[in-house]
Image (spheres, rainbow, N blue to C red):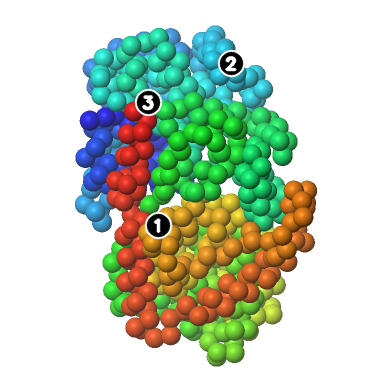
Amino acid sequence: MSTVVHVTHEALQKIGGIGAVLEGLLTTRSYNAAIERTFLVGPLFPGADLSSLDTILYRSSEGITDTPQAEVLTEIEQNYHVEIVHGQRKFENRHQHVTTLTDVLLVNVSNSNEEMTRQFKWQLYEHFHIESSRYESEWEFEEYVRLAEPAYAALQAIIGAETTAPVFIISHEFMGMPLALKTLIERKHDENARNMRTVFYAHEVATIRPIVEGHPGHDVRFYNVLELAKAQGQSIREIFSDPFWYFKHALIDKAHLCDTIFAVGDLVVDELQFLAKPFETFPINLVYNGIPAFEVSLQEKLTSKALLQKYAKTLLDYRPDYVFTHVTRLVKSKGLWRDLQVLMHLDGLLASNDKTAVLFILSTEIATGRPNESVHEMEEAYGWPVHHKIGYPDLVGAEIELNNGVSAFNLQSKAIKVVFVNQFGWSQEACGKRMPVEMAFMDIRKGSDAEFGQSIYEPFGIAQVEPLSFGAICVVSNVCGCCGFIRRATDNREVPNVVIADYTQLQIPPKSFDDVLHIGLAERNAIEMENSRAIAAKLLGRLPRKPRDVEDMLQEGYDIASQMSWEVVVKDYFLPGLKQAL
């Protein structure tokens, strides 16, 4: 039985995608049958709320020393000038009746020993040619470099230096790389470290994201460049500017030194191989993300949809035949403008069929949510969320641009209206009195006829396909990593529950590499306009006409989701990947 150490900023609580992955992995029966002990390692952020820990076993500042290793941990704190918290955190999957308790190791490195940090940075340069001095102004880099040595020492103390069972150090993204590299250094001369293995878990390729997001050609340009580069054996440094300006790249560039690499999508594999020559022949394991699979009755589906229709009727004075949704973070990579392009074509098609629809976009720049009382005041004063005003507590940042697009669409559309709900939560308390009192977040999942998610950069995309088992049509772009998993789960057959939008296929083959590099806004707009027309037509053909159609979608969606569950991910991808690291 082995020990697995996950290094991440979400060790204490779920914040985003990596937290969702940990929750998925740790609450499967297969994981708990194969892994004896799990550690979550990360920084102890100043002012962190430790209430998510079920037990605190060690925290010297509070006089808590309920662990046999208390004396050693105190010595580590004194040597490295850090604060250590060792506790336990419960993970629970009520649907699968799985509960597990994991160890959590947090290290506050804000006042760490500068001399020891300098020595470790010299080792990183000596062994791996990492020039830490270039990135010392980046606290994220500094924080995880400072974390590595005290965390390694604490793990050795708690796990037991003489254990012979495998210990896997999993670096979720760049964050765990300093600890993984520390492990590789120690393994060269310490017999007690020979059983330790290192894994780089690529939830994205941090070097690639700013290239895709930062150029107006977005995915249309980048993935065509990538395809040509692969054919010609070129790497990123030969095509784009030197990526070592970016501290994350400096760390993930060394991921091929780990014992194995996990990648959450097929394109992530291609992107890693594009980074440098050593990645081209490195055995990278596909470890897709999992999605929930719920069996839902036709009546449950229709009840949730009726609540969404009732809300739309209250807001817009009509009861839509179809309800579309997009639940997402409000960032450029999500390609929200593509929703409106598809709807522009679909609007005329629905109107000619005497049908109506609504799209609820649930997204906000304020992750913690707006105060409920402010939302109720905006609703009363000017009809939020149908109408918005610039400035907090309403529109801020990227919300303004999105709302401009929504307003322009609503002015000219006939059969479809878009409601932009810039609030965290989906209930009457969080979203205003006009929302049905019975409404809960799961209703926006269960009741949706189609979920949009046409991202320009999406290593996997759990949210895009979460509504699969609820009978929704998932409209995703071909750059989403989930497409590869869908193809495997469906034996590569076309299914009515998934519409894949390909915005990377060029209408005219490029004459040269230079032509592809110069794909910009005009070229992307033309491709999006043309392809979104085809997506609208395909979506119209898939939308259910009668209850039997909905039942068929529910069954097909559940069957697909069952083949993409976290249990499948752990059994068929994650655990075999760990074996390869041995």
Depicted 155 relative to depicted 506: above or below:
above
Residue 32 appears at what percent x and percent y?
24, 40
Identify residue type, mark 1: Arg
Q: Nearer the viewer, mark 1 or mark 3?
A: 1
Residue 188 appears at what percent x and percent y?
42, 13
Q: Residues within 10 Å of mark 1 (few under 14, many from 20)?
A: some
Give 7 or 485, whichever is nearer the viewer: 485
Q: Quadrant of the N terminus?
A: top left
Residue 168 appears at what percent x and percent y?
35, 28
**Residue ID for mark 2:** 125
In this image, 440 relative to 454: left or right? left
Identify residue type, mark 2: Tyr
Q: Quadrant of the C terminus?
A: top left
Query: At 49% across and 49% down in the image, what residue appears?
Result: 266
Query: At 24% across and 37% down in the image, what residue appears?
Result: 34
What kind of element bears circle 2? Answer: helix
Asked if the residue under mark 3 is in contact with the one under mark 1, i.e. CB atoms within 8 Å, the reply is no
**Residue ID for mark 1:** 488
Specify whether residue 102 is in view: yes
Distance CA(mark 1)–CA(mark 3):
29 Å
What kind of element bears circle 1? Answer: helix
Depicted 164 relative to depicted 9: above or below:
above
Q: Residues within 10 Å of mark 2 (few under 14, many from 20)?
A: some
Query: At 64% across and 39% down in the image, what residue appears?
Result: 233
The first of marks 3 and 2 along the sequence is 2
Distance CA(mark 2)–CA(mark 1):
42 Å
Depicted 13 relative to depicted 163: above or below:
below
Specify whether residue 59 is in view: no
Q: Nearer the viewer, mark 2 or mark 1?
A: 1
Using the rendered view, name the quadrant where residue 252 is placed.
top right
In this image, 310 relative to 547: left or right? right
